[in-house]
Image (cartoon, grey):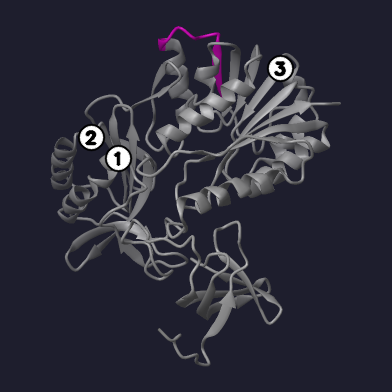
Amino acid sequence: MPAPARTAQTLDLTVTSLGGLGDGLSTHEGVNAYVPFGLPGEKLRCHITRRNRHGIWADIDAVLEPSADRVAAPCRHFGSPGDACGGCSLQHMSPPAYAAFKQQLVEKSAARFPGVHILPLEQTGPHGRRRASFKVRAGKLGVEIGFYAGDSHHLVALKECPVLEPAIENALPMFAQALSRLSVTPQELSVALLDSGLDVMIRADVSPSLADNAELSQMAEKLDLARLSWDDGYGASPLLSRRPARVRFGEVDVEAPPGSFLQASGRGQKAITAHVRAFANEAKYVTDLFSGCGTYSFPLSSIANVTAYEGDGAMVEAATRAANAHGLSGKVEFYKRNLAHSPVLRHELKRCDTVIINPPRGGASEQMMALSASMVKRIVMVSCNPASFVRDAKLLTEGGYALRVLVGIDQFHWSSHLELVALFMKES
């Protein structure tokens, strides 16, 4: 079949590699060209969508010479940038090529640090994401629930999602039906699959009416929700709790507040926790920073005393209640603290031999600088962003820490996101 005719609006590009976001990388007239859904080795006919000082971005009009690693996407919502839901960027890659790309991200994260032992990538696979926030809008046929297309506010109403836990994916049509019957259209629907069932939070500008509450109660019964909360802009409040919204960390059940931090997948949490425990296996006194509801504090409480810090007061209170209920008071202590503005300092870590830190996506430069000045023997970092990981790791190495071991956990399937778990040891 002959190639489509070239017009003044098109250009041919050959992809040489993949960038950190999964875009195909090429060049055009001496500048970088970024092509979503392009694969290395492919020749593509494209049109330019935007330019800036960093280069150009182009969408594919036709694949002139496909890569042997190009496969059919498993989801109907995966496609061109304007039509794709924006959640996945790599469904068009064969599984071996995809795994190799993720392992390369791990290797690139370690490249600036000599002597790092890189462990094999661990993949959690599809149908595993246990939390998601969906956009909501009123359409011609009722309320639609989905994700925004990439770089736009065009909502793609979901008919399926092979990334999600089936319990969430299967509930989407019933959520849409119930929300269509409310007097107000919410802006967002957040769903988390906890160990005790679905935990749902609805965000809207106003509070629900009495009739809305009755409709929502019926929805909760039909879907067997554990808890349903409503956020009208002044914080989330439970509308009804049919049973405790529990999540288990180690051997401890925590009743998590609405919107609590939760690793993206249960399989991911299990893999990350296993590496954290392995890296901290000789710990006696642990400091857990950005501790959430005790994701790592409780699993480590079986081998060490743990002092945990978290900026969200509701999560601190929930973790403290769980510690008391399980007889761990004095063994695991939780404190509310904004670590971005008030980092834990060297003199506060004199007794500590191991720090666990799970910084936010943007990193934690203030806390890392404080840690770099400490004499703590080992630091275990859990990071969901390779770029901020490199920045934070550099601060630690400037303080005399060596990055010894690094592993990637691919719990963000078919995306360019990657979880990293790293062991740093004090050398000077």
Q: Is residue 26 above or below residue 68?
A: below
**Type of amino acid under label 1:** Val
Bounds of the magenta segment? 325-335
Q: At 70% across and 17% down in the image, what residue appears?
A: 352
Give the residue at mark 1. Answer: 200
Could you say whether the residue bearing mark 3 is in a helix, strand or loop? loop
Task: Inspect the image, locate mark 2, and give the three-letter code of the amino acid beneath it.
Answer: Leu
Amino acid found under the numbered disc labelled 3: Asp
Q: Residues within 10 Å of mark 1 (few under 14, many from 20)?
A: many
Q: Which residue is mark 2?
A: 225
Side (left or right) of 30 relative to 410: right
Relative side of 88 to 219, left or right:
right
Quadrant location of the C terminus in the rendered image:
top right
Of labels 2 and 3, the one closer to you: 3
Q: Distance of mark 1 from mark 2, alpha carbons?
A: 7 Å
In this rendering, would 198 be left or right of 3? left
Q: Residue at x 17, y 49 (%)?
A: 178
Q: Which residue is mark 3?
A: 353
Give the image location of residue 326, x and y in percent.
Answer: 42, 10
- Above or below 41: residue 135: above
